[in-house]
């Protein structure tokens, strides 16, 4: 069995590579990553010592190169983590998001069609559903919630989801899609909330929180996300979408206060800054289909997982400084 994992030098992809190579030591794992500013080869360098692991520094949109890799590696399955993933950057410059997140997915699926109707799994996001009001806690996103995107990032991911499902219907490509809520854990690029605030707090710098900090995110530990993707690959029904969420809604301001508490830093470091354009208020995921259908459940308690994560960044001061200059 050979699996291609794209975006494996990024946050979730690298955690998935460690999870997968550990769980399935007999399978061949091929990582494709362009190594954009968000990709960090050092994170996965230890894996290159394993005989069954192969790395290609390649752009998803480079059709010839992708087809060559498929021809050489003959994959049985592909999991696509590769994407431009930062909402703020998509507001600054949407074009690269449309290229990678939509046309890159098309290239991968064309390769899947050409080289034996290869099983394809698309990693998507709960952001395709837009947001929910803060004062209606009973509302949550199900797989049939309408797509109602807010940012160029989420619009590009929603476009890809539709394309993936269209390739299933039109060409019979065996696909699945998972839409996950906010991940946290080790190896996350320090532009995202938890590593950014942790690294700034460690340096006693101000902690800039958007708006009032009352926006709510549904957090899930990255290891729980990896187990969900594994369950979908092994037992999921092709043509289906699966929501993945931690049943863990927390306000941004409370995440930042917890980081201060874990590091023993004063909350007076927190400063409120102008809100992000189109900032989503609340995300909440109903993952019942995955829980009841495939027997998956999140295992990491948020306070324990967040404390471990904050300590991981504090204990790995060699990992993140090179990334700050990118
Ligand atoms: N981080 C989250 O909380 C979260 C939540 C839900 C879904 N997702 C989705 O999960 C996936 C991974 O997210 P992440 O947070 O690990 O992102 P990330 O930005 O940390 O990593 C993305 C990786 O993709 C690579 N990449 C980017 N463009 C590429 C291209 N054209 N060709 C090849 N490789 C390319 C980058 O080099 C990087 O290694 C994305 O699809 C994202 O939409 C993320």
Image: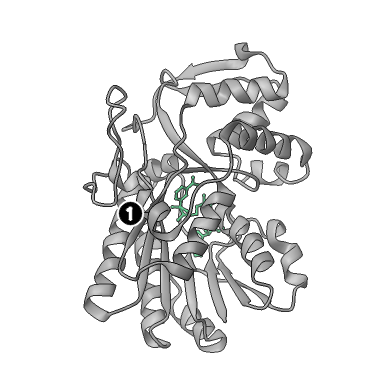
In the shown orientation, is residue 160 left or right of residue 38? Answer: left
Q: Residue at x 41, y 88 (%)?
A: 116
Q: Residue at x 58, y 55 (%)?
A: 10
Label 1 neighbour load within 10 Å: few <14, some 14-19, many 20+? many
Asked whether mark 1 lies closer than 8 Å to ligand 1, one says no
Q: Nearer the viewer, residue 107 or 174?
A: 174
Q: Residue furthest top?
A: 268
**SS for dot 1:** helix
Tag count: 1
The x and y percentages for residue 192 are: 54, 38
The x and y percentages for residue 66 are: 48, 78
Q: Determine whether 58 is above or below 224 in the image.
A: below
Q: Nearer the viewer, residue 220 or 79?
A: 220
Q: Determine whether 295 is above or below 188 in the image.
A: below
The x and y percentages for residue 248 are: 47, 35
Corner quadrant of residue 256? top right
In the shown orientation, is residue 191 left or right of residue 120? Answer: right
Q: Residue at x 72, y 27 (%)?
A: 202
Residue 60 can be seen, yes or no: no
Residue 172 can be seen, yes or no: yes
The x and y percentages for residue 261 are: 66, 20
Q: Nearer the viewer, residue 256 or 248?
A: 248
**Quadrant of the snapshot with the N terminus:** bottom right
Q: Which residue is mark 1?
A: 156
Corner quadrant of residue 119? bottom left
């Amino acid at each position: 069995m050979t699996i291609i994992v794209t975006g494996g030098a990024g946050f979730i992809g690298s955690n998935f590579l460690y999870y997968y190579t550990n769980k399935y030591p007999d399978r061949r794992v091929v990582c494709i990553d362009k190594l954009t500013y968000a990709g960090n080869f050092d994170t996965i360098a230890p894996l290159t010592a394993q005989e069954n692991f192969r790395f290609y520094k390649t752009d998803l949109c480079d059709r010839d190169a992708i087809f060559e890799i498929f021809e050489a590696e003959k994959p049985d399955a592909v999991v696509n983590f590769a994407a431009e993933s930062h909402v703020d950057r998509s507001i600054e410059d949407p074009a690269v998001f449309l290229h990678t997140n939509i046309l890159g997915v098309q290239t991968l699926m064309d390769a899947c069609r050409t080289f034996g109707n290869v099983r394809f799994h698309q990693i998507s996001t709960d952001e395709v559903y837009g947001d929910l009001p803060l004062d209606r806690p009973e509302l949550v996103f199900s797989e049939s919630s309408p797509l109602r995107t807010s940012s160029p990032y989420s619009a590009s991911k929603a476009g890809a989801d539709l394309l993936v499902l269209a390739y299933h219907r039109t060409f019979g490509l065996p696909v699945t899609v998972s839409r996950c809520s906010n991940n946290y854990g080790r190896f996350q690029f320090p532009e995202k909330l938890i590593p950014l605030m942790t690294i700034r707090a460690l340096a006693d710098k101000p902690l800039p929180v958007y708006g009032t900090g009352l926006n709510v995110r549904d957090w899930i530990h990255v290891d729980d996300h990896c187990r969900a993707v594994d369950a979908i690959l092994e037992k999921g029904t092709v043509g289906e979408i699966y929501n993945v969420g931690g049943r863990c809604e927390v306000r941004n301001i409370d995440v930042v206060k917890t980081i201060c508490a874990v590091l023993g830093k004063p909350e007076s470091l927190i400063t409120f800054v102008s809100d992000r354009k189109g900032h989503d208020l609340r995300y909440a995921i109903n993952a019942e289909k995955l829980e009841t259908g495939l027997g998956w459940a999140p295992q990491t308690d948020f306070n324990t997982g967040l404390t471990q994560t904050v300590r991981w960044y504090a204990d790995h001061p060699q990992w993140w400084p090179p990334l700050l200059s990118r």
